[in-house]
Amino acid sequence: MKFPAYFSSLTARFLHRSQAEQDLEEELRSHLQHRADDLERFGLNRAEAERRARIEFGGRERFKEECHETFAGNFIETLARDARFALRKLRQSPSFTIAAILTLAMAIGANAIVFSVMNGMFLKPLNVPQAQSLYQIQRGRNRDPNQSYPDYLDLRNRNRSFADLAAYIVTQVALDTGGSPSQVWGVETSGNYFDALGIRPYLGRLFHASDEHGANSAPYVVLSYDYWHSQFHDDHGVIGRTVQLNKHPFVILGVAPPGFRGTLVFFSPRFFVPVVNREQVEGANDLDQRGTRALMGVVGHLKPGVTPAQATADLNSIASYLGKAYPKQDRNVSFSLGRPNLFGDQFGRPVQAFLGGLMLLAGLILLAACANLGSLFAARAADRSREVALRLALGASRGRIVRGLFTEAVLISLAGGGVGLWASVLFLRWLGAWQPFGNFPVHTPVNPDARVYGLALLLSLASGFLFGVVPLGQVLRTDPYELVKSGTKCTPGRRIGGRDLLLASQIAICAVLVTSSVVALRGLLRALNGHFGFEAHNSMLVTADLHMAGYSGKRVPLMQKKMINVVQRIPGVAAVGLSDYLLLNDATTSAVFTDRTTDLSAANAAADVYVYHISPEYLRAEGTTLVYGRPFTWHDDKNSPPVAVVNREFARKIFGSAEKAMGGYYKVSDGTRVQVVGIAEDGKYASLTEDPHPAMFLPILQWPSNSTWLVVRSGRGPQPLGTDIRNTLHELDPGLPVEIETRYDEMVTALFPSQIASVSLGVMGGMGAMLAITGIFGLAAYTVSKKKKELGIRIALGAQRKEVLQAALGRALKLLAFGSAAGLVLGILASRVLALVVFEATPRDPLVLAAVVLAMSLLGLLATWVPAQRALAIDPMMLLREE
Amino acid sequence: MTDQAQLLPGTLDLLILKAVSLGPLHGYGVLLRIGQISGQALLVEQGALYPALFRLVRQGLLKASWGVSENNRRAKFYELTATGRRRLREETDGWNRLAEAIASALAARPEET
């Protein structure tokens, strides 16, 4: 065939089809006219001549159609015809079609969802100009994303690689716009923040580096577009209005552009304030302390032409300067670059690894689904071998028949992909609107985009070809003469061989999925019932921001004492304790030194420990077990010697053992000698999956703190107790903003990763289980229907039920056993990865093994139940009569 | 009409090429020419001509252009391309060889076997 001509007529077919048609129409008309002219010459009148010409010409439409077929485009024509044929075939077996489509929809939907999340979190660029050159600076070998403000200033002023460096801290304030104050999340930023990111205002103006003139010099606030839209109803008059931030007046400067949500992908701040006003916003100014690394992220664009490696080298030369100039805080510091999306790589990497793992599992599900459909298709092709033989005998080419089968497979896979995508879009919409953390504005950027649609289409087509290829060999081997002659199948042995392998691997994949979900669920159960170093049952939390209410200095401890006393008097309250921070909520660390250390620089620190400043009753209220010694009393105040309660890990690490630690002395970061008076059990401080970490508790009267958490232990229901607490505190001070929640609600953030992991793995495991059932069911049902005759003869010859079942289902059950064993081993190997995210996810747990074996046996039983019944119900007499 | 011979499959293309080789023709003209050069012995069904013409154009053996006929009507004229001319030669040779072979086979007498 001549390709240029072919393509030009192909284009003609699609682009100028109407023109080609007109052309043909005119040519035929011209033919008729010429013929009519001739007939006229024989003496007919014109009308009669034209009529005769038309009659002679014959079926005009048929010839036109034939002409069209000779125009290229044959391929498309045949495809359409194949599609019509395939649709007819599929309509003949609706249950097969629906099962196949649903199986695929599930698998492709799972892939689309996981990929969308991956896409939203990591692949899609942040909504800032030139997001690909934006990096976050990380500290030290463990890639700590937090920097101190003085370090940030040095990094910003001394580097030569970044166009500019901006800093930000996520914070929560009481924002009063004229009504009642509400708790709102936003970010404190360096003055150059918007300029460094290249953000232009939507309304009014943004603040700049030139607005900063020292502490509290820039009482300005910029609203995010979403917040302005929802709280101020697009009111253009808000510019210049004064609002109260933690009772300090701030002027609204402008509104950030729509879609700008800072540099964190999961958080949408409501407002931006200059970090130089941190004292007003937070109540304390820690910006001048080089050792205090609040949750301050530092981000910036690389200059054009500067590679990340060059920038890292540049930063590390600053690091060596910092180490020399500030040996106490910055000795041996180093810097690296990370992605800003998830606040640096320290948090981002595990999330990415987990999503990658999920992606892998979703891929496995798709593979299992393809194996499943492949064996279904092979069985179908075997059943249709007579039809295939007949068509071959009638002259159809093998290519044509194979193409027909492929068309069926691809049609099913496209339908499955469509349904799956539709379902995943619904789910993702819900996920996008999900707010798991109370008023913390989570932004889940998972709306599917072209990439997701493309992936779904690609996966559909690929899986269609994958399972369409399975029956191929079978069709190509079909010998029409043999088949038509003998009337029955040829030797079934070989054909089953490949299918057996498919099914076994499918079951292995499903067993992997089931294993990992059981491991994850067990981990979650342990997390919920596990020991965190405090008792989460029957525990309420009250947080009151004394600073917001205007308390400061000496009035703070007095007020805290009063609050404890009034809540203590509420009926049903067993104990009330106070702490400035909470376990598993917000941990600050501080360096401690052995008693012999005199040079208190960071390099000589004995350990970095978590610090909690607590009231005497706190340990009792939290349910923290005191292993040795005594709790604090109200006499452990500024007039008595400094004391501490430390945890076991602290005692082991600093003193060698708990016994040696009791009564021993150590130094805290400001050099104060502290005596250990009690040893508490170890707990979980920053995350559920952490290793034991040293922690110390210090009396709040000796180390006053503004931050106030009350832990209320009571057996009463959370609702009435909460109301009582609120009323009581309101009586004490009506202007005190108070938040009350149960301990479990508060733990949402800490439990969140485990829960998400468990739920997603659970769903994957469920899908795996379903695929295992359909796979085994398919094989068993097929075997029984094929072996009907043999089974009938066995029954007629007096076979027992057991023997009949063995003949019918032996193979399926053997495959199940093999596949499950292989999958279990693989699953155990794979779930080491889970241990990173899931609390105490250990696969070497007899309960997990037992649960998986039980689950797979149950699945097998469930899937073979119906075919077994069918096998036993065979009536030999009926069968013989039928034949 | 009974004295007309049946067209063998595949011969229509050859006839069309031959007819057009004698000079550019429109579709109806091709029909007339085939009738004329075969002494009215071969008659082509009118409608069947056009799919064959389209096929030959697509194979690059013929090229078509619009013009005005002797009846002063607009018509599409076909003429041979270089490839078409070569094909006609090959097919004619092939056909002649086949015809001779068949003729000599059919002329065989019992004593010659």
Image (tube, coloured by chain):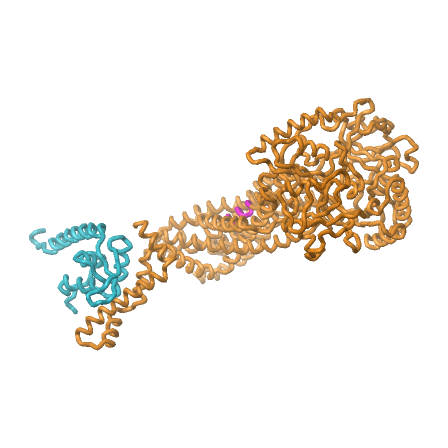
Chain colours: A orange, B cyan
**Horizontal relation, residue A135 to residue B12: left or right:** right
Is any part of residue A781 visible from this angle? yes
The spot of residue A419 in percent (x, y) is 54, 56
Is any part of residue A845 visible from this angle? no
Q: Main secondary structure of the magenta part?
A: helix
Query: Nearest the camera: A269 or A405?
Result: A269
Residue A5 covered by magenta stretch: no
Q: How many marks?
A: 0
**Horizontal relation, residue A864 to residue A553: left or right:** left
**Horizontal relation, residue A418 to residue B37: left or right:** right
Query: Nearest the camera: A491 or A400?
Result: A400
Q: Which residues are magenta?
A: A363-370
Residue A369 covered by magenta stretch: yes
Q: Quadrant of the C terminus of chain A?
A: bottom left
The spot of residue A467 in percent (x, y) is 47, 49
Q: State the residue at coordinates (63%, 42%).
A: A197
The spot of residue A152 in percent (x, y) is 69, 34
In which image quadrant can residue A349 be found?
top right
Q: State the residue at coordinates (28%, 66%).
A: A28
Work out whether A308 lies above or below A261. above
The spot of residue A826 in percent (x, y) is 58, 39
Query: Nearest the camera: A644 or B111?
Result: A644
Query: Nearest the camera: B60 or B42?
Result: B60
